């Protein structure tokens, strides 16, 4: 225990020791943002992470103490926020980020929250009958009207753009329309792994796009190797096939008689003779 923890209550010392123990047992130590996650969802997340990662919620000051005594982990302290918690795992940071993204669920927006993306209300009928709901939707900036005895959205409209605040009237209207724009779940803020700190923006990889990029790069490399006649174990067969095809084409065009192309040479000559006969006939 460090000198600056000597005068701490025993329960705080125990908590710091527990953080240090977990940090020494796992390859990765991460910070996750717990803001706005209901208690029930936290329980579900813990259950989903069981056997893969361990989540620990504690005071930020105790995390700072523990990190300060763990040397390199001190770099994570600057990423602490008011709602940070610890996560420990033996997975690499990219796998952990992907795993946490899959724990997220959609929830209704609360007044004052920031829209994570453009919120678009689509044109068309709703399930509501005529009533006060029309005025409530209109006050929220949603173009509602009554058509054929039902409340209808008259046109598709972006009611709030990504990064803008969602006011109370709009939040209430979105709830009524059963639109849940908020992604709620553990958000990885930073991870310490094998001596380096990984920020969340580095870890946010579109796996499908990344896979397609690799396939595209491999295809281009293969074609370049074949067209440049640069043989490798993967392209030698295609290069030889291409060379044989081109040599055969030259032999047929030059009417070179050989066992491999004699049929094609004679066939070409016959076709030319017939064409000439048709012209002169």
Image (cartoon, rainbow, N blue to C red):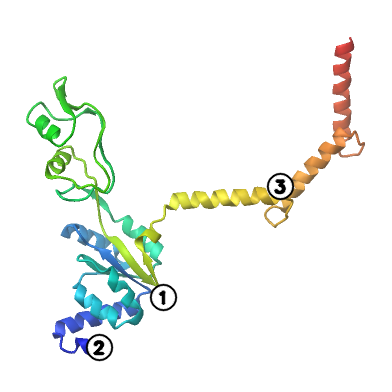
Reply above or below: 155 against 40. above
Q: Distance between the residues labelled 2 and 3?
A: 65 Å
Residue that extends furthest to the right in the rendered view of this protein: 257
Outermost residue, front side: 164
- Residue 259 in percent (x, y) is at 90, 39
- The percent position of residue 253, horizontal first and vertical second, equals 86, 33
Q: How crowded is mark 1: few (under 14 residues within 10 Å), some or many (20 or more)?
A: few
Which residue shows up at 31% across the image and 77% down it?
74
> Which numbered circle lies on residue 195?
1
Q: What element carries label 2?
A: loop
Residue of label 2: 2
Task: Evaluate whether residue 30 shows in this view.
Answer: yes
Of residues 266 and 85, the one nearer the viewer is 85
Compare marks 1 and 3 and give the one earlier in the sequence.
1
Q: Mark 3 points at which residue?
A: 227
**Residue 89, position as x, y percentages in the image:** 34, 70
């Amino acid at each position: 225990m460090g000198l600056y923890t000597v005068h701490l209550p025993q329960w705080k010392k125990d908590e710091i020791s527990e953080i240090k123990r977990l940090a020494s047992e796992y390859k990765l130590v991460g910070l996750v943002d717990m803001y706005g996650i209901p208690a029930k969802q936290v329980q579900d997340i813990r259950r989903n992470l069981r056997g893969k990662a361990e989540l620990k919620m504690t005071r930020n000051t105790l995390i700072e103490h523990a990190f300060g005594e763990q040397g390199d982990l001190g770099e994570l302290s600057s990423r602490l926020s008011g709602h940070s918690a610890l996560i420990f795992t033996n997975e690499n940071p990219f796998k952990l980020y992907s795993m946490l993204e899959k724990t997220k669920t959609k929830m209704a927006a609360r007044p004052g929250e920031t829209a994570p993306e453009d919120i678009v209300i689509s044109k068309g009928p709703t399930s509501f009958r005529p009533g006060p709901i029309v005025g409530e939707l209109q006050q929220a900036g949603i173009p509602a009207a009554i058509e054929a005895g039902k409340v209808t959205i008259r046109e598709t409209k972006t009611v709030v753009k990504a990064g803008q605040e969602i006011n109370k009237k709009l939040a209430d209207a979105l709830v009524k329309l059963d639109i849940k724009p908020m992604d709620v779940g553990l958000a990885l803020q930073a991870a310490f792994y094998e001596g380096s700190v990984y920020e969340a923006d580095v870890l946010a990889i579109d796996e499908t796009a990344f896979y397609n990029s690799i396939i595209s790069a491999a295809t281009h490399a293969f074609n370049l190797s074949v067209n440049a006649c640069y043989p490798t174990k993967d392209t030698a067969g295609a290069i030889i096939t291409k060379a044989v095809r081109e040599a055969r084409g030259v032999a047929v065009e030059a009417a070179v008689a050989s066992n491999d192309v004699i049929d094609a040479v004679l066939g070409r000559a016959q076709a030319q003779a017939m064409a000439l006969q048709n012209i002169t006939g």
